[in-house]
Every structure is written in C-alpha cells, then in structure tokens.
Image: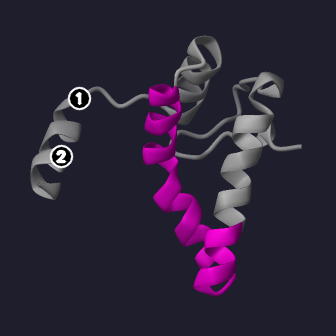
Amino acid sequence: MAITLAIKNWFQQQLSPDELMLEYLSSHDNRALERLYNSCADDLYHFVLSNANPHIAADVCQKTWLKVIDNKEQYRPTVSSKPGYLPWHVIP
C-alpha cells in the first residue's frame, strides 16, 4: 500500500507548503490541511527529534500543528519562504 501511495504521489503535482497553506486558508477544508500536514509533518518531526527525545518531539509537533490551525488567518506568504519548509511565520 505504501508503495502504491508513493508512486501516486510521485506522479501528482507537488504544491509548496505556501501553496498548501493558502489552499487551506481559502477553502477552510480539512483535506487541504491534511495535504499540508502530509507534506511537512515528517520533516518537522525529524527536525525537532534532532534536538529532543521522541516524546518531547511529538508534543512539540502536536502543539505546532494546533497553532497552525488556530492562527491560520494570520498567515501571510513571503517571497523568502523556502520550498519544502512549513511556513513558520504563521506561528506567533
């Protein structure tokens, strides 16, 4: 199943985190949030894990995603956003 999903994702056009965040902001659709999460969650977790134990990393990631949801209206895309990174400036 994971291989099928990986192949399917390989053929689909990948949107940047900024584009996914804008899609979520404009649609208020949980599927858009899910796509943003699927795009960024692993990288976020592994980054936090490199600086903390697994329990703390999971907690920090959960709190980060809750802040993304709660503060989505404050999101403003910037030209300095790097592809492949969660738009951190959404988190006050």
Read off the magenta span.
30-59
Q: Which residue is mark 1?
A: 12
Provide the secondary structure element on which disc 1 rests: loop
What residue sits 17% from the left and 56% below the top? 2
Quadrant location of the C terminus? Answer: top right
Quadrant location of the N terminus? Answer: bottom left
Query: What's the residue type where badge 1 is placed?
Result: Gln
Crowding near the residue tagged with mark 1, few <14, some 14–19, many ≥20 C-alpha atoms within 10 Å: few
Q: Is residue 44 magenta?
A: yes
Q: Main secondary structure of the magenta part?
A: helix
Q: Is residue 89 above or below residue 45?
A: above
Report the front residue among 66 and 43. Answer: 66
Residue 5's disc number: 2
Q: Quadrant of residue 72?
A: top right
- Mark 2 and mark 1 in contact? Answer it, CB < 8 Å: no
What residue sits 66% from the left and 49% below the top? 65
Residue 69 pos. (x, y %): 70, 37
Q: Give the Cα separation between the discs numbered 2 and 1.
A: 11 Å
Residue 89 pos. (x, y %): 79, 39
Report the front residue among 13 and 63. Answer: 63
Residue 5 pos. (x, y %): 18, 46
Query: What's the residue type where badge 2 is placed?
Result: Leu
